[in-house]
Image: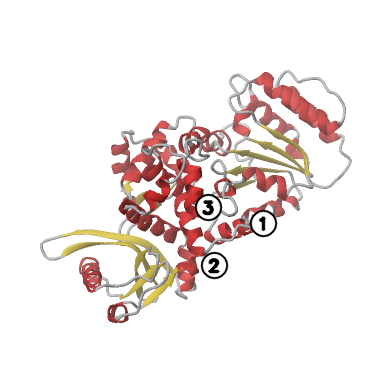
Amino acid sequence: MEIVGRIRAKSILDKKLHSDKAELIAILGRRRIGKTFLIKHHFKKQITFHFTGLYQSNLKEHMERFQSNLATQLGIAIKRPASWFEAFDLLKEYLEGLKSKKKKVVFLDEFPWMATNRSRFLTAFTDFWNSYATHKTDLIIVICGSSTSWMIKKVLRNKGGLHNRVTAKITLRAFSLNETEQFLKNKNIVLSKYEILKLYMALGGVPFYLEQIEKGESIVQAIDRLCFHKDGMLRHEFHELMASLFDDSKKHESIIHQLQQHPQGLQRDQLLKKAKIKSGGGASQIMEELETSDFINSFVPFQKKKKEKLYKLKDHYMLFYYKFIKHSTPSSKGTWEKMFSGSSNQAWSGLAFENICHQHIELIKKALKIEGILSQDSGWNHRGDDTHKGAQIDLLIDRADQIINICEIKFSDNEYVITSAYAKKLRNKLSAFKHFTTTKKTLFPTMISTFGVYENIHSRDLIQQQVNMEALFDKI
């Protein structure tokens, strides 16, 4: 299968492939995001040695597998190394015996799992890099790991021999809607954009999750099989995901739990208090790890200071897990079909679609033909006072050309109809925004919806611009 997307990552890898020095590349990203696939396929002609760490293993088992892998590469039997120092010495001998002067890639996958208790793995690797690899201009070492906390703490923030040794860091993120559509087409799965949107709302653009979709089944059937069947692949994914990424995942789970209960976001102090985590260096690391893993994001509301920024849970699977999977009873079939038609699904659909719009904001700006105008996107909320009712705006685009797009985001299975009641509500929202922000800029009420807005007197009077689902599938 060809590599879908990953344009920036492939560009970095190509640049390093043609550099005139040794390279140490760190690949980060959540489990199932396609780190191994990217390196194995992009560097398939250059990989001279590939070793994968063993989960919850020990030094002896790692040495046995290292011996086996290296023996296969050499084509001869070799002794089993007794330590990582001996293992890397054997690797040096192997690399020195290669006659080609072209760039060679050593791929160490699941790097954190190799650092078992008392193995001195990181010390041995540091010695291997500093005393040997860094002097080999034809060598690329790629280290990869799902354990975000370990990679940040032990590699990227290393204060010892690996300090500032990483020459490139690549963080892989979920596919966009365009890349998701392309990925499914490569599997000969043809779905409408609306169906792909519903799939993305539940599972996001995680390649492994998308790989589980089968040809000939509807999205409702696929989600039912993967998430609600007693043996569903994604039924217990949440806890397995957290355990694989973070050394002590309970605090990370507590943060996620609080954010899913507050979809409009929380400030840092509010969030830590609710999660019962003390503010300090440890809390900052937890927040950084969750952002690096692409589970949460932060933004500064309109006219607020940086210290007032809000954190929101952005991962689609996690939002879906908490809303539907966590408290569901395993069933053989039909669970999601029943839930999908329920009222709770309508509220979730709106929030999930809003989440997608925030993640595809550059495409929204492109559709509005304002991508060339300096702008800042954010949200806004005010409780109101004795003089005026409050309001909430989930997305606004503050432009340098003295325009602010006030975006209303609506998910529906047909054209969205603006009723007289909704028109009144929107006018009140615009009035509240003008009143409390005292902005002198012109406001453009803008509708972002799945199938566009039904034209009537209210849409003609109120809506200045609109964007539909099709624009979100464009290439960034």
Separation of marks 2 and 3 at Cα, in angstroms: 15 Å
Q: Name the quadrant containing residue 413.
A: bottom left
Query: What is the number of the mark on residue 205?
Result: 3
Packing grade of label 2 (10 A; few <14, some 14-19, many >=20) is some
Q: Which residue is mark 2?
A: 474
Q: In the orientation shown, which residue stands out farthest toward the left?
A: 386
Instruction: Single out the mark in the foreground, 3 or 1.
Output: 3
Separation of marks 1 and 2 at Cα, in angstroms: 21 Å
Is mark 2 in CB contact (under 8 Å) with mark 3?
A: no
Separation of marks 3 and 1 at Cα, in angstroms: 21 Å
What percent of the width, then of the height, locates residue 428? 21, 69
Q: Name the quadrant containing residue 161.
A: top right
Q: Which residue is found at the position 54% from the left and 53% from the top?
A: 217
Q: Which residue is mark 1?
A: 11
Is mark 1 in CB contact (under 8 Å) with mark 2?
A: no
What percent of the width, then of the height, locates residue 127? 69, 29
Q: Earlier in the sequence, mark 2 or mark 3?
A: 3
